Amino acid sequence: MIRTRSVVAILGSALFAHAATAQGRAELPVIPQPASARPFEGSWPVPAGLPVEVAYQDDRTLSGWGVRVRLVPADSGNGPESYTLTVAPGAVTITAPRAAGRFYALTTLQQLVDAAKAADPAEPRIGSVTIADAPRFRYRGLHLDVARHFQPVSVVKRYIDLMARYKLNTFHWHLTDDQGWRLAITKYPRLTEVGSCRKETMVAKNFSPYVGDGTPHCGFYTQDEVREVVAYAAARHITVMPEIEMPGHAVAALTAYPELGCTPGPFEVMTTWGVSDDIFCPTERTIAFLQDVLTEVLALFPSPLIHIGGDEAPKVRWDASPVAQEIIRREGLKDSHELQSWFVKRMDRWLSERGRRLVGWDEILEGGLAPGATVMSWRGTAGGLQAARLGRDVIMTPGPPLYLDHYQGDARFEPLAIGGFSPLETVYAYEPIPDGLTPEQQRRILGAQGNVWTEYLATPAALEYMAYPRALALAEVTWSPRAARDWAGFQRRLPNALRQLDRLRVAYRLPTVTGLERDVTTLEPRIAIPLAATWPGATVRYTLDGTGPTATSPAYTRPIEITTTFDGTTLTARQFTSDGRAGPIRAMVVRRTVFRERDDVQSSALVLGLRMALIRAAVRSTVGIDTLPVARRAVVAGVTVPVEDEDERVKPFAAVFSGYLEVPEDAMYEFSLTSDDGSTLWIGDTKVVDNDGLHGAEERTGMIALRTGPHPITVRYIQGGGGAVLRLRVRTGTGAWRDVPASWLTHRP
Ligand code: ACM
């Protein structure tokens, strides 16, 4: 459980307090936290009338207010984005080797000014300090998918503006996909005439029966608009990296130019989400077309990195296409995976010859990585690790936790999202350098990025709700030294940062109450649940009937006493700010339990391993899978995906693991079941973890009190097609999670 210390420590002081962190660093009210800060005697009175947006003022205006800005020769300082900022009683002085560092110094000053004004509106002062700052990573990205839902230039500019406040420096603009082509290409006008419109949009989740909204969704950017966005971003030291998807996610383009497919179609700009079997056919005609498109892209975007997608390209059309098979033969390739690699290598060479570098999603590793390619690791970090070990550049963007379209709270109380669970805390805890790399390989990790896919994000407010404050956590992950990362400190600084966003009416998600992180199962007849507000001056309100708290629900004053029942009590809570805003709702279930007695099977009658029955069927739920025909039986050492072969893992299947779980002591056990798609854990006739249904990798937990000895266990698992993940972990009390030991898993031979 997280406990927030008093937020007033920073904000209530006439100067901002230099709260000492665990590492003995001075903490500033700034996100991302600077690399180093040395406070000294005295303070600078913030001049009345200092422009509200300091970061955008020119040097002459600033000097009138006692801010001196100096660009020093490029060989001094700590890299092109570095700066020093000294706040002293007489003046503020900024030095930087380049304009980017100067800009970042001003964004830091902006936040110091805002914090000083929040602490003392009448006489704001900033405590004297010398800040020497530079980013930990040179790539600090935020992505926006405008293909699934188009956003006009004004919204894109605002998105870029917000990034700049937190020193994010790369805007990854996802411009093309199955559901829309958003970039005007002069040579191929049908891309936007036809490809920028879909006739309607599916209303509910993809796994539901189809219901369309009956409303066309259209939109694209003219080349003048793109130039405007690129210039706007450059003025904020942000590079715009365009993404043109190939060979998959191409249905909008195929609708405009069906001759680029391996089949005659017909194609239609998609109205549902997901992955299409229809992809570009890798012919010379397609390659010429895409290089024509990229020629216009290079003229618009000065970015050294050009993203060509490469993800989620099923090979069914290529496998069945005489043309594709002929290329495989001609080029001496093994299969369609090598054909995709060959295709990406063509693009890589073409871009390299023009002084640019290809970026692709981690699927571009399959069949051999193109020599100049940078890998964007999204299906976890394995692709990033592999690429770094090959000596290639890597951008980390694993979802979870860096998919900012994932849920950030309890799905029962959040706006409909694609799934997943990536709360602010897990984004903040993300470490871009994975274990197991040499120092040389670590240097290949250029940085990290948050991705905002927009299947379920139609409005600017929805984008902002998902991106903020998680993008602030990402900014600190990518800019600040690892030693400066401090979750408690970040939480203390967050309300002040968010109040600055209030000035811009950003629709961010308010922080949540703490204390409801997990459901509780207890042997005790009564327990007390402590809750805490995370917003200064907020009132926590709660209910015990499962409904969301309203402004008239009881206010929290002391730990909530609950008389536990076997049916369970749902506690919900949220905080209300003093200006009347209601924070997100959190809920937990408190349930009484008794020890489950051990099974009377003799331990000597059991041998190691669980029985596993593999079922080849496409199902939507684990319910009833035990009655389906079994394709293969085995005894396995643990609960993991029971299909090794990568090609086989992406086809639908189900599995039932059964046997005994032999626990070593009488205790309350907490189980965690992570799966893509669904899974359930049963012990005896109790469903301990319910993670059922078709979804991406998600974790669910549940608790059960077990007596020492064997208990019947069943894990059911379904895989609907796509990525396969299955992991069962256990802990007792607040101990560390570990995989359920193989020595606990047995069956009757
Ligand atoms: C992706 O999310 N398909 C890169």
Image (tube, rainbow, N blue to C red):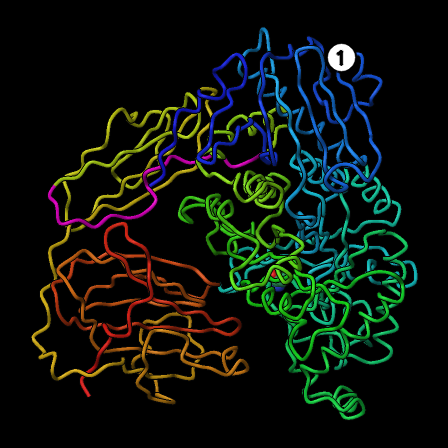
Q: Between residue 318 and residue 369, name the one nearer to us.
A: 369
Q: For the residue labelled by badge 1, is the local secondary structure a helix, a strand or a loop? A: loop
Q: Residue at x 61, y 46 (%)?
A: 478
Q: Ligand 1 appears in which quadrant?
A: bottom right
Residue on which disc 1 sits? 65
Q: Which span is picked out in magenta?
A: 507-525
Q: How many marks are shown on the rendered structure?
A: 1
Classified by dominant secondary structure, the portion drawn in magenta counts as loop
Image quadrant occupied by the C terminus: bottom left
In the image, residue 159 above or below residue 535: below
View extreme (right): residue: 187
Q: Residue 101: horizontal and vertical position, in percent?
A: 75, 35
Q: Residue at x 55, y 82 (%)?
A: 647
Does residue 452 appear in this view?
no
In the displayed structure, does residue 338 sit left or right of residue 434? right
In the image, residue 506 above or below residue 206: above
Q: Residue at x 36, y 78 (%)?
A: 655
In the displayed structure, does residue 13 sit left or right of residue 280? left
Q: Is residue 242 on the magenta stretch?
A: no
Q: Is residue 518 on the magenta stretch?
A: yes
Does residue 625 appear in this view?
yes
Q: Which amino acid type corresponds to the residue marked 1 in the rendered image?
A: Trp
Q: Residue 228: horizontal and vertical position, in percent?
A: 85, 41
Q: Residue at x 76, y 91 (%)?
A: 332
